[in-house]
Amino acid sequence: MKLTVVGGGSTYTPELIDGIAGRRTSLAVDEIVLVDPDEHRLSIIGPFCQRLLQHAGHPAKVRTTTSLEQGVEGASAVLLQLRVGGQAARASDETFPLTCGCVGQETTGAGGLAKALRTVPVVLDIADKVRRIAGENTWIVNFTNPVGIVTRALLQNGHKAIGLCNVAITFQRWTSGLLGVDPSTVELEHVGLNHLTWERGVYVDGVDRLPELLADHVEGLAEHIGIDGGLMRRLNMVPSYYLNYFYNHDAVVKKQQNEPPRAEVVATVEKELLDIYSDLSVVTKPEQLSQRGGAYYSEAAVQLVHALTGGAGAEKHVVNVQNNGTLPFLPDDAVIEVSSTVDSSGGAPLPVRPVEPSISGLISHVTAYEYLALEAAIHGGRDRVANALLAHPLIGQHAIADQLADELIAQNRDLLPWV
Ligand code: G6P
Ligand code: MN
Ligand code: MN
């Protein structure tokens, strides 16, 4: 099977390849093509990935190309992990909202909208080419942020796509450690939208161990996630750390106003990683990669591709899929992130217990914002941008939404097709 990675020049790619190398017996990949516009990066990442595979005794061949058309031809699955505008655009997303007292984050709030506006047109163009060249049967696995909005754009345009994030698998791995059980035995009751999720149950052999986690490990959870343990107990759920941007918004903004943006930190880590990857004597995944937020990305992606390409029969995974009545308070065509069964026909959400009002309002609110964000990304226009910002629960004020809209457009002028 041929796998294509769009955005293959990312410093994350070796993480993915490491996962493939470790799954030799179950995932029959014999060709991996890395597609990226950056030839310099490809010239470092490609050979390093080949060394990783070779060292693990994996027979797959790695090819690199700047041509999407050549890269996707004959692929069984295409993974999207691109970042339009690179870390420079991310740095802008993480800083321009701060002047209005709003959180600066690459997937949440005004920064997330900027990213969606830059990314959706590029991803839709790529997906059209995948469909035309690789064919209707090729799966698109979307890891490109903001995953919820981008996946909704893909599904709305009839693409064979599914969205993936590592928040759930990271929680699964971490809590299985706390409970002293094998991660494969842990099933999460994970509900919400991408980067707006809560764990409502942690099942091991059919028994919900969340009460035990909240009773015995709440300090650890609180420290890891950045959200107060008492609040978790009161909600009777474990929010993802992205809920920090909501539950602790003003405190986060204060902190962000006094420290360099994450994009700067990541740029330094990336430089270091590229130096390591260039060293021909390095044949394993370096420790420094763990400084990035993508822990277990490889495992999640490899397991998902395995299930989608029919290798596994039905498996349970947390994925981004169309709602279709699963959360009855949302439109059917909203994209939600929930535990689902996945096989070669795609992901089907497992039934969800009625969602508590403590979180259902926020989920609805952000879903409406995501709809408006996608409208702005597809049709463009300053008013659509301002409307999406006004509908975001972290913004909501007319004057601020208008000011952020103007600033967003000014900063992204060269990367928005309609400006
Ligand atoms: C987590 C999120 C990803 C995000 C990443 C950022 O893994 O699930 O969606 O891209 O963090 O990590 P970084 O190292 O780039 O800050
Ligand atoms: Mn994510
Ligand atoms: Mn332009």
Image (cartoon, rainbow, N blue to C red):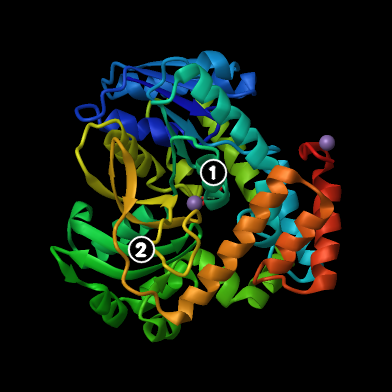
User: Residue 162 placed where, x, y %?
Assistant: 43, 42
The quarter of the image holding the C terminus is: top right
Q: Quadrant of ligand 3?
A: top right
The quarter of the image holding the N terminus is: top left
Q: Is residue 312 left or right of residue 151?
A: left
In the current view of this chain or complex, which residue is farthest to the left? 205
User: Residue 327 placed where, x, y %?
Assistant: 41, 65
- In the image, residue 106 sits, relative to residue 221, either above or below, namely above
Disc 2/disc 1 C-alpha distance (Å): 24 Å
Q: Is residue 218 visible?
A: yes
Q: Is residue 94 left or right of residue 130?
A: right
The image quarter containing residue 283 is top left
The one nearer the camera, 48 or 317, is 317
User: Residue 339 placed where, x, y %?
Assistant: 32, 57
The residue that disc 1 covers is 156
Residue occupying the point 78% across, 36% down: 417
The residue that disc 2 covers is 190
User: Residue 31 placed where, x, y %?
Assistant: 37, 17
- In the image, residue 117 sits, relative to residue 339, either above or below, namely above
Mark 1 lies within 8 Å of ligand 2 (Cβ measured):
no
Q: Amino acid at mark 2?
A: His
